[in-house]
Every structure is written in structure tokens, then in C-alpha cells.
């Protein structure tokens, strides 16, 4: 569905050039549910804008559903976007003067869908999100959760193959957030490909696959955690060596042990790591990963890893 290779996006900041995306390779198969997690400023929205055909990369190739979209004109790009992609944003992005019905109808008008068909599709989409009885309400007459459901109905009305959700639960209370997530799961089960951006580890854990983004670079979250642990171990070893004291923990100060696959194990940091950063055991790897990502030191360690 999505195949990005070597995507670079630069922003000129005075005399400095910032690489908001630094040679990103991203592949998402049809019907996958992928979450991308990363701190503020890591490049999530920049990536989303390119995936969503709202912006162009400065370098690299982007194949969407078998079509090279990196070379298309803005007009062609708008057509692809309207036909293939449904957007769900943190701020809902509904038009305040339009009713729920009219908001959902808008992309169908852009597509030139005739009136009778439009009526059917809008009604179906609003029924699907449980808002058939709120069609005539304007956004300010709806709760946050209901507004997001209208936004989901709008994203669904054109039956897009790909749904892009940028922090879709970020402005919602936990119950409404839960409803939105349930809806995304349902859509995924019905065959939609979903790419979800979030700060929230618990939300990310619900996806079929997780990726991490940091300083414009993409990692699998497992790879990212491994790097973070290695950086912590290195830091610990050099700190221990610096003070000349015998480090605590039987593995401390030793090179990282290797697991049977020949990959360095995350063990060295275990003795001194905060909760959630200890060595991996396959059956516990996922909850631990979430706990580790929630740790503020996790991000710092990852940064160090790449600087090393
Ligand atoms: N139009 C722009 N001009 C200059 N710099 C930009 C522009 N848009 C984004 N940036 C910079 O690019 C980097 C990535 O920004 P981006 O908006 O993608 O981050 P993000 O991961 O979505 O953050 P957040 O979680 O806060 O939304 C940031 O350092 C940001 O300041
Ligand atoms: Mg953003």
C-alpha cells in the first residue's frame, strides 16, 4: 500500500537547514494497522503530510497503491488524496458552519458524486459511526467524541483504502478515545489500511505493528529499544570506569552478552535500569517496551544511541 524509499524533507530555518525527515524508508502492506510513535518535533506530522499527499518530499520515492506519487502535479496529487485517503486529525477539522451531514458530504461533492448517491453514502457513513440521529447538528452542538465520529464518517464516506489518523484520541476523554479506537479496529477488520500517529504508548500497543520516529529517522520500536538499552549500557560502563569503582551487578562493565541469534542482549542495563528497562524475555517483551517508552530517559537514551 505504502512504499517509501529514502524520503527526505528539509526546512530552511534562517541559515540552517533542518532535515525533518532523514532518509525515511517506510513500507505498509494493505490491511495493516501500523502505529508510529515519537516525541514532539520528531517529524510525525511532516511524515503524515507526505504519506497523505499533502506535501512533497525533497528527495526519495513514494509509491502509493502501486503509483509513483512523488512526481505528480499538485492537481493530480489532490485527486489521489481524495480518492484513496481518509484523514482523521486531533482537532477533528470539521467546518463549523456546516452540519454533520454537510461535513461528511463535502469530500463526495469534491469527487463529483451525484446527489442521490451522495445522500446514501453520507447516511451510511453516519449510521456506521452511530450518529444517524445527529445529522443536522453543527460541530458546536456535538461532544468532542461525537465530532471525532463525524470526522471518521467523513473519512469513510469515500471508501478510502488508507486511513491516516494523526493523534485521533489526543483531544478526547478516555471513554470517547476508546470508542474511536474501537472504530479504527473495526475499519481495519473490514479491510482498511490504518496508519496511526500517537504519543500514547497504550494506544500504539493496540496496533498490529509499531514504529518509532526520532529526529526524522524511523525505527522499528524493537530496534529503537535495543539502541536505547545499548546507549544506557555504554553510559553506565563509561560512568563506572570514570569513577574507578567496581560497578554493581554481575554483568556491569562487561561487553554485552549475546543471545542465541547473535544479537547483543539488552542485559547490561538491567541491574540499574528504571522499571521497564530490564533485559528482554520474549513473552514479556511488549509490555516492557511500552513501559520503557513511557520512561522519559528512554528518549534521551535513544538520542545518545544515534549520536554515538
Ligand atoms: N513548515 C515548517 N517550517 C520549518 N520547520 C518546520 C516546519 N514544519 C515542521 N518543522 C520542523 O520540523 C520538525 C518536525 O516537525 P513535525 O511537525 O513533523 O513534528 P511532530 O513530530 O509532528 O511534533 P508534534 O508531536 O509536536 O506534533 C520540527 O523540528 C519542526 O520545528
Ligand atoms: Mg505533529
Image: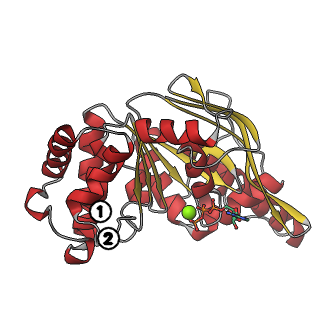
Quadrant of ligand 2: it is bottom right
Q: Residue at x 14, y 65 (%)?
A: 136
Residue 218: mark: none
Compare residues 148 and 256 and report the one nearer the observer.
148
Compare residues 119 and 153 and report the one nearer the observer.
119
Nearer mark to the viewer, of 2 and 1:
1
Q: Which residue is drawn at 56% across and 43% down?
A: 51
Residue 263 relative to residue 67: left or right:
right
Q: Is residue 114 above or below residue 270?
A: above
Q: Residue at x 57, y 49 (%)?
A: 54
Q: How crowded is mark 1: few (under 14 residues within 10 Å), some or many (20 or more)?
A: many
Q: Quadrant of residue 228?
A: bottom right
Q: In which quarter of the image is residue 144?
A: bottom left
- Sequence-wise, the earlier of marks 2 and 1 is 1
Tell me whether circle 2 and circle 1 mark residues in contact (CB < 8 Å).
Answer: yes
**What residue sits right under mark 2 in the picture?**
172
Q: In this view, does 206 lie above or below 239?
A: above
Q: How far apart are marks 2 and 1 (CA)?
A: 9 Å
Q: Where is residue 197 in the image (x, y as percent from the top left)?
A: 48, 54
Residue 109 relative to residue 269: left or right:
left
Q: Position of residue 294 (x, y in %)?
A: 50, 64
Colour scheme in use = secondary structure
Secondary structure of residue under mark 2: loop
Cβ of mark 2 under 8 A from ligand 1: no
Q: Can residue 145 be seen in this view?
A: yes
Residue 207 relative to residue 269: left or right:
left
Q: Where is residue 169 in the image (x, y as percent from the top left)?
A: 36, 63
Q: Position of residue 25 (x, y in %)?
A: 66, 36
**What residue sits right under mark 1 in the picture?**
148
Compare residues 51 and 97 and report the one nearer the observer.
97
Amino acid at each position: 500500500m505504502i512504499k517509501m524509499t529514502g524520503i527526505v524533507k528539509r526546512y530552511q530555518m534562517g541559515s540552517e537547514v533542518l532535515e525533518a525527515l532523514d532518509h525515511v524508508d517506510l513500507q505498509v502492506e494493505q490491511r495493516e494497522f501500523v502505529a508510529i510513535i515519537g516525541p514532539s518535533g520528531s517529524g510525525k506530522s511532516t511524515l503524515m503530510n507526505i504519506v497523505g499527499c499533502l506535501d512533497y518530499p525533497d528527495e526519495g520515492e513514494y509509491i502509493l497503491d502501486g503509483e509513483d506519487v512523488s512526481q505528480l502535479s499538485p492537481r493530480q496529487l489532490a485527486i489521489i488524496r481524495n480518492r484513496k485517503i481518509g484523514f482523521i486529525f486531533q482537532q477533528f477539522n470539521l467546518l463549523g458552519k456546516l452540519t454533520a451531514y454537510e461535513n461528511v458530504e463535502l469530500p463526495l461533492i469534491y469527487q463529483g458524486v451525484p446527489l442521490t448517491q451522495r445522500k446514501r453514502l453520507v447516511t451510511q457513513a453516519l449510521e456506521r459511526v452511530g450518529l444517524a440521529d445527529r445529522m443536522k447538528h453543527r460541530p458546536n452542538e456535538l461532544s468532542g467524541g461525537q465530532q471525532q465520529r463525524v470526522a471518521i464518517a467523513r473519512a469513510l464516506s469515500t471508501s478510502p483504502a488508507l486511513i491516516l489518523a494523526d493523534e485521533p484520541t489526543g483531544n478526547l476523554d478516555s471513554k470517547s478515545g476508546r470508542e474511536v479506537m474501537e472504530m479504527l479496529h473495526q475499519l481495519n477488520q473490514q479491510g482498511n489500511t490504518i496508519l496511526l500517529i500517537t504519543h500514547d504508548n497504550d494506544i500504539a500497543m493496540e496496533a498490529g505493528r509499531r514504529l518509532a520516529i526520532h529526529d526524522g529517522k524511523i525505527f522499528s520500536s524493537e530496534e529503537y529499544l535495543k539502541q536505547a538499552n545499548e546507549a544506557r549500557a555504554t553510559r553506565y560502563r563509561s560512568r563506572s570506569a570514570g569513577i574507578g569503582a567496581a560497578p554493581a551487578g554481575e554483568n556491569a562493565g562487561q561487553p554485552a552478552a549475546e543471545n542465541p541469534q547473535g544479537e547483543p542482549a539488552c542485559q547490561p542495563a538491567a541491574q540499574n535500569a528504571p522499571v521497564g528497562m530490564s533485559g528482554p524475555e520474549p513473552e514479556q517483551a511488549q509490555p516492557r517496551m511500552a513501559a520503557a517508552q513511557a520512561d522519559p530517559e528512554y528518549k534521551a537514551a535513544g538520542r545518545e544511541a544515534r549520536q554515538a
